[in-house]
Image: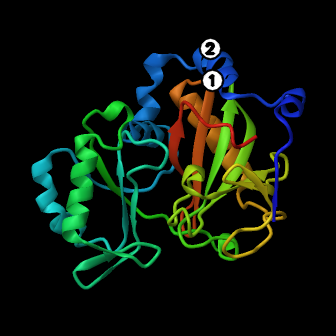
Amino acid sequence: MFKFFASPASLKKRGLIGINRRNADLIMRHNPRHLYPLVDDKLITKQRALDAGIPVPELYSVIQYQRQTHNLPALLKQHEDFVIKPAKGSGGNGILIIAGQFGDHFRKPSGELVSLSELEHHVSNILSGMYSLGGVADKAIIEYRVKFAPIFKDIIFQGVPDIRLIVFLGIPVAAMVRLPTRASDGKANLHQGALGVGIDLASGESRGGVLLNRYCTLHPDTHTSTAGLKIPHWDAILRMAITCADTVGLGYLGVDIVMDRDLGPLMLELNARPGLNVQ
C-alpha cells in the first residue's frame, strides 16, 4: 500500500521545490503582505467571493463576543447540521463539523456526541484566539455544511472531500483532492491524516496519493484505489480557481473548492501560503 518517496536529490533534479524556495521565490515575491487579510480572514474572503459571483457555503451566523455563546441554542435551532470554524484559523484547526442532532446533543460525522456546553466551550476557545493566526482574538463562523457529491461515496470515510488547486500568476499549476479518513475525523486536512490524491490538470482525473508523507494508492479505510476518479465540473472548477486569484490579487494562491451534492462547486477558502504536498 505504501511506498517511500525518492531521495531529496532526485526530487530536486525533477524540479520539485522545498519550503525555503517556496517562501523566497513564490510567497515573498508574488504575494504582497497588504493583501493577506483578504485570505487570512474567512469572512472577508467570503464577501469578496460573493461580490465576484463565486458561490460559497451559506453563512448562518457570526459570533464575535463571549457573551453571545449563550445564544447558541437560538442560533442553531433551525439548522440540523452546520459547521463552526474560526474566521482566522489555519491548517484545519478549530473546525467543528456537526452532522445532526441527537436529543440535546450534537453529532459529529464520526458519530461522537457533543453537548451544548462543549459546543459553547469550543466557540469560546475560537473567540479567545486559540486557533487563529498569531493567537489574536477571533470570530466564530457558523455556516452551511457541505453535502458530498455521490461520486466520492466509495472512496471516503465520512466527512466531505475538497479540491486544492495551486494558482500561480493566474494559471492553475497543480491540483489534488483531499479525502477524509477515520484518522482525520472526517476533515479534509492532510496534517490531520486525510489522504491527498493528485489530479491531472488536463483531464480532471485522479492519480496516486499521499498519506502522512508517504505515497499511497489505496484509501486506508475504504481500501478503494485512488486512481481513475473523474472529477465532475472540472472546467468550471479551473475557471473558479482563476477567478479567485484575480479577486484577491495574489500571485501564488491555494484555492480550496468543495463539490456539493446539490449546489455543485463551492469555494471554501483561500490560502496565501499553500503547502507543498500537492507536488
How did the renderer colour the structure?
A: rainbow
Q: Is residue 188 left or right of residue 213?
A: left
Label 1 with label 2: CB-CB less than 8 Å: yes
The residue sitting at the bottom extreme is 103
- The residue pinned by badge 1 equals 251
Q: What amino acid is found at the position of numbered circle 2 in the picture?
A: Arg
Picture coordinates of residue 193, whole percent (x, y): 59, 58
Please tell me the numbered disc located at residue 29.
2
In this rendering, is residue 37 above or below 43?
above
State the residue in front, 61 or 31: 31
In this rendering, is residue 203 above or below 44?
below
Q: Nearer the viewer, mark 1 or mark 2?
A: 2
Quadrant for residue 262, please give it. Answer: bottom right
Query: Residue drawn at (75%, 52%), measured in percent from left and top?
Result: 214
Please tell me the numbered disc located at residue 102.
none
Picture coordinates of residue 169, whole percent (x, y): 69, 24
CA separation, marks 1 and 2? 8 Å
Q: Is residue 206 visible?
A: no
Quarter of the C terminus within the rendering: top right
Query: Badge 1: how crowded within 10 Å, few (<14), some, or many (20+)?
Result: many
Query: Residue drawn at (14%, 48%), measured in percent from left and top?
Result: 66
How many marks overall?
A: 2
In this rendering, is residue 101 above or below 128?
below
In this rendering, is residue 215 above or below 91?
below
Picture coordinates of residue 147, whole percent (x, y): 52, 69
**Secondary element type, mark 2:** helix
Q: Is residue 135 left or right of residue 256?
A: left
Query: Residue drawn at (72%, 68%), measured in percent from left and top?
Result: 219
Query: Residue drawn at (82%, 46%), measured in percent from left and top?
Result: 5
Q: Is residue 27 left or right of residue 177?
A: left
Picture coordinates of residue 226, whole percent (x, y): 78, 64
**Secondary element type, mark 1:** loop
